[in-house]
Image (tube, helix red, strand yellow):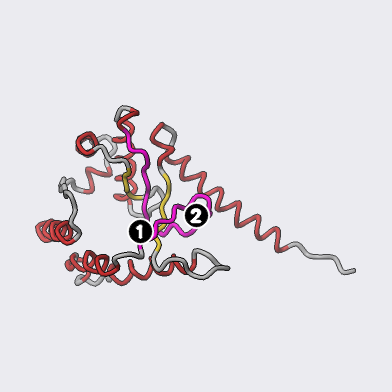
Amino acid sequence: MKSVRRLEQRKAAFVGEYSAVLQLDHPSAHVKDASDGTVVSDLLAILQATRPELVYTHNLADKHDTHVALALRVLTACRALQPDQRPKRVIGCEVWRDLDWLCDADRLAMPVDTHENLHAALLGVFDSQIAGGKRYDLATAGRRRSHATYSESHATDRHTGLIWGMDLTPLLAGGDPAEHARSHIRRFEQDVLDRIARLGQETKPL
């Protein structure tokens, strides 16, 4: 299966005309082990060689352990760079948990409604996952379209596909990732409670 997945990633790079694809082959156990520095070392080398201005990774509220661990390793690698070499922005993307719960001010909207034929082709390359009984191709396209429709309740659709992101850029200069995630959760909690309080107050009869 590893060989199949490696080949699928290379096919996707060809279809998407990627500039490069780097296959590090780290097992999940290494990614999840914060004391194992090999993953961060590899990521640091890649960042130093490519000097990206924008980095996409997983978000801190994902429910997949390996995804959250990887986001933390990416942040560690970015912080290890000299300040003038760090990416200008790091965005955590949704995979195993949607980010539609984020408050509007905390939610980064990334329209993905161009080249839908290319989206379908890229998703279709990973046949080993789809044929195994997980329709990622349909689910991914459906989620993007539903985000576009449900993003605004009082306006017509401006896009046919949206991905939500969590801005991790403030963490480049330091700070606690757990507190960063907690601040988003607290703002969401307050938004829900404020709306209930505002709309649930009984009016006194005249």
Alpha carbon distance from label 2 to label 1 = 15 Å
* 185 relative to 4 in the view: left or right: right
101 falls in the magenta region: yes
Residue in the image at 34% along x and 50% along y: 58
Residue in the image at 22% along x and 69% along y: 130
In this rendering, which labeled residue sits more in front, label 2 or label 1? 2
Q: In this view, does 156 lie above or below 22?
A: below
- How far from the left and from the top, in percent, is residue 127? 18, 68
- How far from the left and from the top, in percent, is residue 173? 41, 31
What is the magenta range?
Answer: 86-112
* 186 relative to 128 in the view: left or right: right
Residue in the image at 29% along x and 45% along y: 70
**What residue does disc 1 label?**
96
Between disc 2 and disc 1, whose residue precedes?
1
The count of marks equals 2
Q: In which quarter of the image is the C terminus?
A: bottom right
Residue 30, quarter of the rendered image: top left
11 falls in the magenta region: no
- How far from the left and from the top, in percent, is residue 48? 22, 34
Query: Mark number for residue 102?
Result: 2
Q: Could you tell me the amino acid type at mark 1?
A: Trp
Residue in the image at 31% along x and 44% along y: 55
- How far from the left and from the top, in percent, is residue 21? 16, 50
* 155 relative to 3 in the view: left or right: right
* 186 relative to 76 in the view: left or right: right
Marks 2/1 in contact by CB < 8 Å: the verdict is no
